Amino acid sequence: MTRATPTSPTTGPDIVASGGPASAATGGASARHDVAAAAPAWAGSPWRERLRRVLLAVAALVLLCAVWELYRAVGPTDGGRLFGVPVLPRATDTAMPHTWDIVAQLGEKEVRTAGSDTVGVAVAKAMWFSLRVAFAGLVVGVVVGVLLAVAMARLRIVERGLLPYVIASQTVPLVALAPLVAGWGGKLQLGSLEWERWMSVSMIAAYLAFFPVAVGMLRGLQSPGPNAVELMRSYAASWWQTLLRLRLPASVPFLLPALRLAAASAVIGAIVAEISTGTRGGIGRLIIDYSQSASSDASRLYDAVLGAAVAGLLFAGLISLVELALTWRRRHGGGRARPIRKVGT
Amino acid sequence: MTSTGPATAPAPQAGAAEAAPAAGAAPVPAVEVRGLDKVFPVSGGGQTVALSGIDLTVAPGEFVSLIGPSGCGKSTLLRLVADLLEPSAGEVRVFGKPAGEARRGQDYGIAFQQAGLLEWRTVAGNVELPLQVHGVRKKERRARARDLLALVGLADFADHWPAQLSGGMQQRVAIARALAERPRLLLLDEPFGALDEMTRERMQAELARIRHETATTVILVTHSIPEAVFLSDRVAVMSPRPGRITRIVDIDLPNRVGAPGESGGLADADDVREQSAFFAAVTAVREALRAGGPA
């Protein structure tokens, strides 16, 4: 439930942008155009396709602003109600500031004292903080998710016993969990490591991030068909060799979309956890701070939300880089491939 | 030219299986199957008898086909020889060793109807897979893969991806991969079953040549009578439910590409297929199949 709040600004542009960086690096394969027809999807898409994606992303943004402003112009100033329930926002400065006001606010000073940061700088700093915390959470979540998936793939009994709890874990309301985890602060001492507050936030981000990885990875590890498994058995390959040579590579196509989901979840988890644990320094805290002044001027609040969205985009870009790294050999290792001559058989 | 004999055509030498490759005396059979039963449990409590009382001996260098209608258990028999399945009763020995030991010792290579190439590996990478699993060093792997790809006529395709290859080419890669560990026995489970007829005939000629060059013992599972006749020294005809070997047909085609040392040079495959001996053998196998039960 709590997750829903920051989701909408994050996932919207996320989808549009996700294809962009991924196709960017694959575009230069025009020399291998001749094999593209027979080659699998990762062999590369032409520049035109890449340009089209960028233009579509920009067009979507422009359209969003246009709809916003259009509603500002024609929408009812006291909002729309249906049977007494508010269904439409008020088209006022406080509820829906003009898009240009939101952008202009980025240049304003946060506090009216000399040496105060502008809102834009404050948002950027908060973004950087939240991103680092979310990244730590993502790394922990991915490691935990992969290990869980491997354990579940290894032993059916572990899968039967664990999978229901993995799924149930995601129905626990995050706001209930966050204060508990935050309570670890000062009580936990792991060797020389002092448990700090941001670590609690990272833990909550990891708690959201591990789930798609565990589920996606498990499916990937189980994806090789019986023939492939029999083949490895005929080689007298050990379970670990089968994992390394067959199951792990086979799970990459399943892992990549899971990583995207995990990255988005980690950002959401970090921001929500910042809010519910009262951690300072990140986007979550900024949203709380700015919302206190939102009754008079909401544009700052929207700037903070914008920061959350951009953080999500940056994470999506990061995952695209991981994707490039994981599929690099497939796209470029075969670079010496000549055009297919259809020999008889 | 065709004669039907008892199921154990070259009489198994008692006790020879345990001996090391005997000097002078009868060699250890490549595959020796005795009294083999395979029963699969069926959900609900019942059971299916897939194979019953199978006896089969394959001599080193011999090419034996298993032929029969769908569901006669020919693939099951192959998997039992490969130790991919456990027999319910009876014994399988490969080069005198229990099937499990032979599998761990890489005495056989296997290929299935689906080429089953790993799509994230290049053609050469797929051929190298068994070598990599067994810790062969990279340089040796490369060299071996190159030799094998030359053997199956795909030397120029080492760096291609499986998805870039036609079905017949993929199947050649699978056969090259099965030969990677220089096995003395090649197990083929309908390797050409998914190919069109023209490609299929060409692949059969290729297989005959490869077998000639590598002197490998081959067991081929097929449901194509001409394929079995064209390639085999003996064809084991099976009947369904419970699967058993009803007859073994000896095939003797003059001028055929056989095991090295056999008479007959590299005759044109089409010449072999068009001689009367070929048609007679096809008829003999067909009659044996018909006699075995409803096909």
Image (spheres, rainbow, N blue to C red):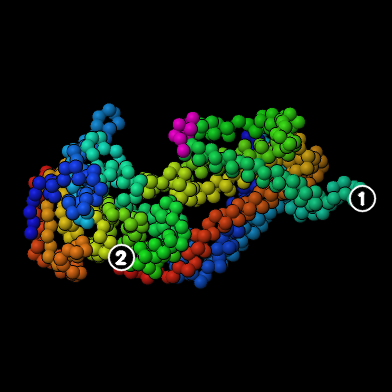
Query: Which residue, given by chain and number where applicable, does mark 1 sit on?
Result: A114
Q: Secondary structure at mark 1?
A: loop
At x 70% / y 43%, what residue is drawn?
Answer: A133
The answer to whether residue B161 is seen in the rendering is no
Amino acid type shown at disc 1: Ala
Query: Which residue, given by chain and number where applicable, does mark 2 sit on?
Result: A345
Counting from the top left corner in percent of width and height, residue B8 is at: 13, 46
What are the residue bounds of the magenta stretch? A154-161
Counting from the top left corner in percent of width and height, residue A76 is at: 71, 44
Q: Is residue A145 left or right of residue A88?
A: left
* Disc 2 crowd, CA 10 A, few/some/many (<14, 14-19, 20+): some
Quadrant hosting residue A89:
top right
| Dot label at residue A63 | none
Counting from the top left corner in percent of width and height, residue B27 is at: 20, 51
Q: Is residue A274 above or below residue A17?
A: above
At x 30% / y 31%, what residue is drawn?
Answer: B43
> Which is in the foreground here, disc 1 or disc 2?
2
Residue B97 belongs to the span the image colors magenta: no
Q: Chain of mark 1?
A: A
Residue A155 belongs to the span the image colors magenta: yes
Query: Do the residues marked 1 and 2 share a common chain?
Result: yes
